[in-house]
Image (tube, rainbow, N blue to C red):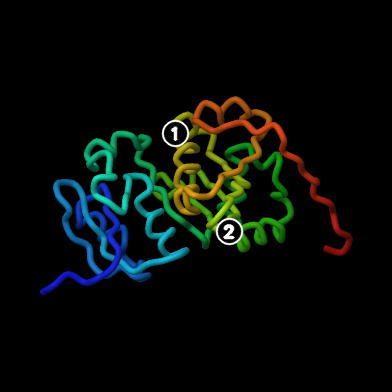
């Protein structure tokens, strides 16, 4: 039987592992097959946001539309992921309770309206991307971003539980957020005062001409 037609996405996981990650993802995936030791090829017809979501599922291990674009097989890539094992995923249904809890545990709650539940719920409901990091099911990190998926991505909230900091989780959340939005977009982030020295360390470039209009309280809302 001939292979189904479609685009190809090569990933640094074996076919059985790739299929497990794709369980429940029905947006254009037609077949998953081996592409060599520790690698698989996904034949799909996904486009636009569905393609971004598909790519985001493999951002932690590496993906490419050409097999020659893959750098490392999964065996060597796994060693780059933080220990204890952290799972990363797109989680558009993240609850306000979990979001507030990790904001508190990260100290970002000091600069977010955690006492205003309506605002928090609106922040989650209207986000373009929510990427989470979990350890044994517990939420230990979150990235919340707004993007047009074509030109720019504003990473509004990046929070990592203090007990899990200095393990590369924040860097990985940024990487997966950018991958999900599209690497062709410019990622923009406003640093918390205590984190100003962190972002150059992970390869981000400082921009000195950013201007803002602060939030205003609207009477009756």
Residue 84 position (above or below residue 126): above
Q: To which quarter of the image does residue 82 belong?
A: top left
Could you tell me which residue is drawn at 46 percent across and 43 percent down? 175
Residue under numbered circle 2 = 148
Q: Is residue 121 left or right of residue 160?
A: right
Instruction: Please rate how many residues cluster around mark 2, counting C-alpha atoms within 10 Å: few if below 14, some from 14 to 19, many from 20.
Output: few
Category of crowding for the residue at label 1, using alpha-carbon neighbours closer than 10 angstroms: few (below 14), some (14–19), many (at least 20): some
Q: Nearer the viewer, residue 18 or 132?
A: 18
Residue at figure coordinates x 31%, y 58% from the top left? 21
Badge 1 marks a residue whose secondary structure is loop
Residue most extreme to the right: 219
Mark 1 or 2, closer to the camera: 2
Residue 2 occupies quadrant = bottom left
Instruction: Return the residue at label 1.
Output: 168
Question: Which corner quadrant of the image does residue 79 belong to?
Answer: top left
Quadrant containing the N terminus is bottom left
Query: Residue 46: image x %, image y %?
Result: 37, 67
Disc 1 + disc 2, Cβ < 8 Å: no
On the rendered structure, is 16 left or right of 219?
left
Q: Nearer the viewer, residue 44 or 137?
A: 44
Counting labels gives 2
Q: Residue at x 48, y 58 (%)?
A: 91
Residue 90 point in image, percent of width and height: 46, 56
Q: Please tell me which of labels 1 and 2 falls first in the chain.
A: 2
Which residue is found at the position 58% from the left and 58% from the top?
Answer: 148
Q: CA distance from mark 1 to mark 2?
A: 27 Å
Identify which residue, 46 or 162, lies in the foreground.
Answer: 46
Quadrant where the C terminus is found in the figure: bottom right
- Helix, strand or loop status at disc 2: loop
Figure check: 178 above or below 169: below
**Where residue 53 appears, x then y in whole percent?**
42, 59
Report whether 93 appears left or right of 15: right
């Amino acid at each position: 039987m001939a292979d189904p037609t479609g685009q190809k996405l090569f990933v640094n996981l074996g076919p059985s592992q790739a299929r497990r990650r794709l369980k429940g993802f029905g947006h254009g995936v037609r077949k998953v097959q081996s592409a060599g030791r520790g690698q698989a090829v996904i034949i799909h017809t996904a486009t636009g946001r569905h393609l971004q979501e598909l790519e985001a599922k493999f951002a932690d291990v590496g993906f490419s539309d050409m097999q020659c674009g893959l750098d490392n097989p999964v065996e060597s890539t796994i060693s780059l992921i933080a220990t204890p094992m952290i799972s990363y995923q797109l989680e558009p249904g993240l609850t306000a309770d979990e979001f507030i809890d990790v904001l508190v545990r990260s100290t970002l709650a000091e600069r977010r309206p955690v006492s205003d539940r309506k605002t928090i719920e609106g922040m989650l409901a209207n986000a373009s991307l929510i990427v989470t990091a979990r350890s044994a099911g517990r939420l230990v990190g979150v990235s919340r971003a707004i993007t047009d998926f074509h030109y720019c991505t504003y990473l509004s909230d990046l929070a990592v539980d203090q007990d899990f900091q200095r393990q590369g989780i924040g860097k990985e959340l940024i990487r997966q957020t950018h991958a999900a939005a599209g690497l062709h977009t410019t990622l923009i982030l406003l640093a918390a005062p205590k984190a100003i020295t962190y972002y150059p360390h992970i390869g981000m470039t400082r921009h000195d001409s950013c201007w803002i209009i602060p939030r205003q309280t609207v009477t009756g809302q």
